[in-house]
Image: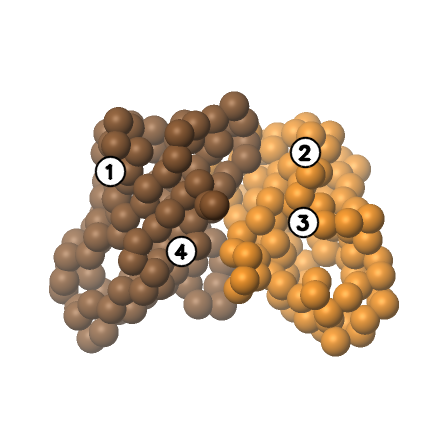
Chain colours: A brown, B orange
Amino acid sequence: KNEVEQSPQNLTAQEGEFITINCSYSVGISALHWLQQHPGGGIVSLFMLSSGKKKHGRLIATINIQEKHSSLHITASHPRDSAVYICAGHSGGSNYKLTFGKGTLLTVNP
Amino acid sequence: DAGVIQSPRHEVTEMGQEVTLRCKPISGHNSLFWYRQTMMRGLELLIYFNNNVPIDDSGMPEDRFSAKMPNASFSTLKIQPSEPRDSAVYFCASSLTAAETQYFGPGTRLLVL
């Protein structure tokens, strides 16, 4: 069983919509990463967080340690936000090993 | 800095051939990771180096895979002999320290026929 679960697997939105992608993780994950991968492209690290909230432009990531849950929000979505979003957790006890979720494919239509 | 550099970007080879993938991490980063990405299994860690020393190679599929990091600015991942099931995208990533943000290279798309 994967220790990091994402939902939804696929998400289609209209340009301008507010988007939320969810990530739940098991006990023992000490920090969470959000990654972005465009089709056929490389992987970009968006956020790393272990508590609270981080914001970068139109992207906001939150984490609730008690509920073992993190969300990635995109405000005023744009077609260029279309990508796969992956959450990954640092396994407790290992400061380097990431456990990856299966990704959420986001398509933003104009 | 140019970011993590990988070569080649694409590789097509025949079963049984040797394949060598190359990675140049970001200067000053002491941690280097090799990942494999497939549709079925997603991203998987193959091997992790810290200060050029292999720390965790538990993700290396089998003896056909080997990785080296002869110095702080260069690493290779070798598959010998290659098999069709090795077809995947191989990413190299580096980070300042093990627990910090990892910066990924553009990946090498490998197809073994």
x 32%, y 45%: residue? A23
Q: Earlier in the sequence, mark 2 or mark 3?
A: 3
Question: Where is residue A100 drawn, in percent x and y?
Answer: 47, 46
Cα–Cα span, label 3 and label 4: 25 Å
Q: Is residue A27 left or right of residue A58?
A: right
User: Percent from the top left, x then y, of residue A71?
Assistant: 26, 44
Q: Residue at left 53%, top 64%?
A: B39
The one nearer the camera, A53 or A98, is: A98
Q: Determine the CA span between mark 2 and mark 3.
A: 18 Å
The chain holding disc 3 is B
Residue identifier under label 3: B23
State whether residue A11 is above or below residue B28: below
- Label 1, on which residue? A62
- The quarter of the picture where residue A106 lies is bottom left
Q: Which mark is residue B86?
A: none
Q: Amino acid at mark 2?
A: Asp
Q: Is residue A93 above or below residue A40?
A: above
Chain at tag 2:
B
The residue positioned 41% from the left and 63% from the top of the image is: A38
Circle 4: is it few (<14), some (14-19), or many (20+) Cα within 10 Å? many
- Amino acid type at image mark 4: Gly
Closer to the observer: label 1 or label 4? 4
Q: What separation in Å lies between label 2 and label 1 (alpha carbons)?
A: 30 Å
Where is mark 4, residue-wise?
A103
Between A72 and B52, the one lying in front of the other is: A72
